[in-house]
Amino acid sequence: MPVKIRLQRHGKKGKPFYWIVAADARSKRDGKYLEKLGIYNPNTNPATVELDVDGAVQWLQNGAQPTDTAKNLLSEKGALLKNHLAGGVRKGALTEEQAEAKFTAWLEEKTGKVQAKVDGLSEAQAKVKAEALAAEKAVNEARIAAAAPVVEEEVAEEAPAAEAEASNEEE
C-alpha cells in the first residue's frame, strides 16, 4: 500500500484550511486517511503551519512520499532535515546528540527569521495605521476650519444689522 503525505482541504469557499495527513495514495483527496500530522492555514500572514515533526519523520522513514506542497511544508518545519540527520545517525556519520544539536540550531534560526517577518509586518501595519490617523485628523481639522468661518460670518452679519436697528431707533 503506497502512502502519501498530502494536504486534505477543509474550510469554506475562498478560505481554504488544510490538514497535513498520511493517506493511502488510492484514497480520495478529502477521504479516509491513516494519520493526521498537522495543519496548514494559508489565510494568515505568515501562513500558519503546525506539524508533528516526529510523526512526519516516522512516516518518511517508513517510505511515505510527500506531495510537492507537503514537501515544502515539511521542509519549512524541519521534518525533512530531521529525517536526513536520522539517516546520518543510522549510517554512523553523526551521533544522536550532534544531530539533535544541529536540528535545534536550525530550528532557532528559522524561528528568528519568522519572528523578524512578524515584527516587520506589525511595524508596517502600525505605520499604515498612524498615517491613516494623521490623514483623518487633517480632514477633521479642514472640516472644522470650513465650518467655523460660516458661523463667524453669520455672527458678523447679525452685528451690523443690530447696529443698524439701534441707529434707526435713535433717529
Image (tube, rainbow, N blue to C red):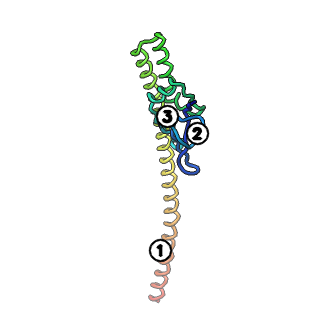
Residue 85 lies, with reference to residue 43, above or below; the image says above
**Mark 2 vs mark 1: in front:** 2
Q: Earlier in the sequence, mark 2 or mark 1?
A: 2
| Amino acid type assigned to the residue bearing label 3 in the image | Lys
Instruction: Residue under label 2, please give it.
Output: 27
Q: Residues within 10 Å of mark 3 (few under 14, many from 20)?
A: some
Residue 64 lies, with reference to residue 137, above or below; the image says above
| Amino acid type assigned to the residue bearing label 1 in the image | Val
Q: Nearer the viewer, residue 81 or 116?
A: 81
Task: Tell me the residue at 50%/74% (across/down).
Answer: 154
Question: Is residue 167 visible in this depiction of the protein?
Answer: yes
Q: CA distance from mark 2 to mark 1?
A: 82 Å
For label 2, the SS is loop
Q: Nearer the viewer, residue 132 or 39?
A: 39
For label 3, the SS is helix
Q: Is residue 1 left or right of residue 170?
A: right
Picture disc at residue 155: 1
**Residue 169 spot, x, y in % from top left:** 45, 89
Q: Earlier in the sequence, mark 3 or mark 1?
A: 3
Task: Tell me the residue at 53%/46% (across/down).
Answer: 10
**Residue 139 spot, x, y in % from top left:** 52, 57
Q: Residue furthest top?
A: 92
Q: Residues within 10 Å of mark 1 (few under 14, many from 20)?
A: few
Q: CA distance from mark 3 to mark 1?
A: 57 Å
Q: Earlier in the sequence, mark 2 or mark 3?
A: 2
Instruction: Residue under label 3, please give it.
Output: 117
Residue 43 lies, with reference to residue 3, above or below; the image says below
